[in-house]
Amino acid sequence: MTSRVSVHLRSRRILLGITAGIAAYKVAGLARLLVSAGAEVQVVMTPSAGEFIGAMTLQAITGRPVREAIFDAQHEAAMGHIELARWAELVLVAPASADFLARLCAGMADTLLHTLCLATDAPIAVAPAMNVRMWANPASRANMKVLGERGVMIWGPASGEQACGEQGPGRMLEPEALLEKVRQVFASGRFAGRRVVLTAGPTREPVDAVRFVGNRSSGKMGYAIGEALLREGADVTLVSGPVALPVPAGARVVSVETALEMHRATLAEVADADLFVACAAVADYRPVSTASQKIKKDADTLTLELVRNPDILRDVAAMPERPFCVGFAAETERLEAYAEAKRRAKGVDMIAANQVGRQQGFEADENALLVLWEGGRTRLPQQAKTRLAEQLISLIAERMDAQTTTQDT
Ligand code: CTP
């Protein structure tokens, strides 16, 4: 199992405030890091910050027009300042000048950025950057104390040589260090810092230009597991067959149709994953050949020759540096015996078995599971797939932690 502990920022909404200071030129790098980590970044500059960095640069990096003016009819119509304050999940002001911090402390609302800081419920973080003597000044000391007591997160400053030639604390933290702090803010939940790849839904195996061999999987169980994992802070990639379900907020979805596509996409995604959950109802066979045109009904009988598809779960479980692997087993009889045999045959850490047929399993909103792992088992009773997903991921977390502990000792 990999030991990566980075937290994804996919779809996290970060309001990046920039105030006047020489360190502002470094913020383009920070904005780029945040965007690369998946965050949505809205830059808000104070009026004189533009002396140090161009709004066009930041707009190009973030893909959003930079906000600056407090009264701006054009932008207020699109997203008013109160909406913007509500939109943010984190306000990060970098660099935060002595003047900005003093005004923040006083609760002033004379710039858009100050107004947003007053109006938002989101956590506020500041990365001070100023001359060493300004930082040491009792006025700054008092302001920082008040801001700290109000719950404003104060990141830095770092010590070192300053642009003015002096030495000491006052340098803005480097963009990489600020990115790490942002990740820590969002690191919560049992799966925080864990990357998960999930397969979900059915696959379609084309017969000709318009027909396919498919199955009735709705994808509901896989999507419910994805949602539950996201709520617990996981970085989720869903490799999904065709389903009629909304994309869970924050998940990355790789859409596929056939088993071969799902196999390829999963193996490409799973390399640095901590957990792989195979929920997809992968077609075991595909037509040997696919007619490029629609097959005409010339003959009385039509024989389809099928060939085995690769087993995605088995192949992931056989990888040398493999993630914790969870599979599903759909059985119509001898649930436990068949599921346990499947778990061993595929070499997976855990298998969740469900009884299918008679209105159970596919397409239903409810399900029940018998979960098996090496040396243990538990029954999760019939209930909504969303609840079931929560219980299942909690079991998975327990087993993953237990495995890590055993590996460490
Ligand atoms: N699976 C997979 N790739 C396949 C087939 C199955 O990843 N080509 C995964 C499924 O996502 C599921 C588990 O393996 O997690 C199911 O195993 P499977 O052998 O297909 O079990 P059943 O569907 O129950 O089929 P059967 O009992 O007919 O073998």
Image (cartoon, grey):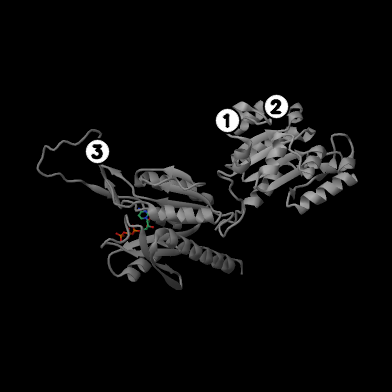
**As rendered, which of 151 and 257 lies closer to the eye?**
151
User: Horizontally, is 76 left or right of 288 in the view?
Assistant: right
> Which of the image's four quarters has the C terminus?
bottom right
Percent coordinates x, y for residue 340 in the rendering:
37, 68
Q: Upstream in the sequence, badge 3 or badge 2?
A: 2
* Circle 2 or circle 1, nearest the eye: 1
Residue 279 shows up from this direction: no
Q: Is residue 381 above or below residue 212?
A: below
Q: In the displayed orientation, state which residue is furthest to the bottom.
A: 375
Say which residue label 2 marks: 54
Residue at coordinates 32% horizontally, 56% vertically from top-left?
362
**As rendered, which of 72 and 312 lies closer to the eye?**
72
SS label for mark 3: loop
The type of residue carrying mark 1 is Ala
* Circle 3 or circle 2, nearest the eye: 2
* Disc 1 from disc 3: Cα separation: 51 Å
Percent coordinates x, y for residue 220 in the rendering:
38, 53
Q: Upstream in the sequence, badge 2 or badge 1?
A: 2
Q: Quadrant of ligand 1?
A: bottom left
Percent coordinates x, y for residue 304 in the rendering:
20, 46
The type of residue carrying mark 2 is Gly
Say which residue label 3 marks: 208
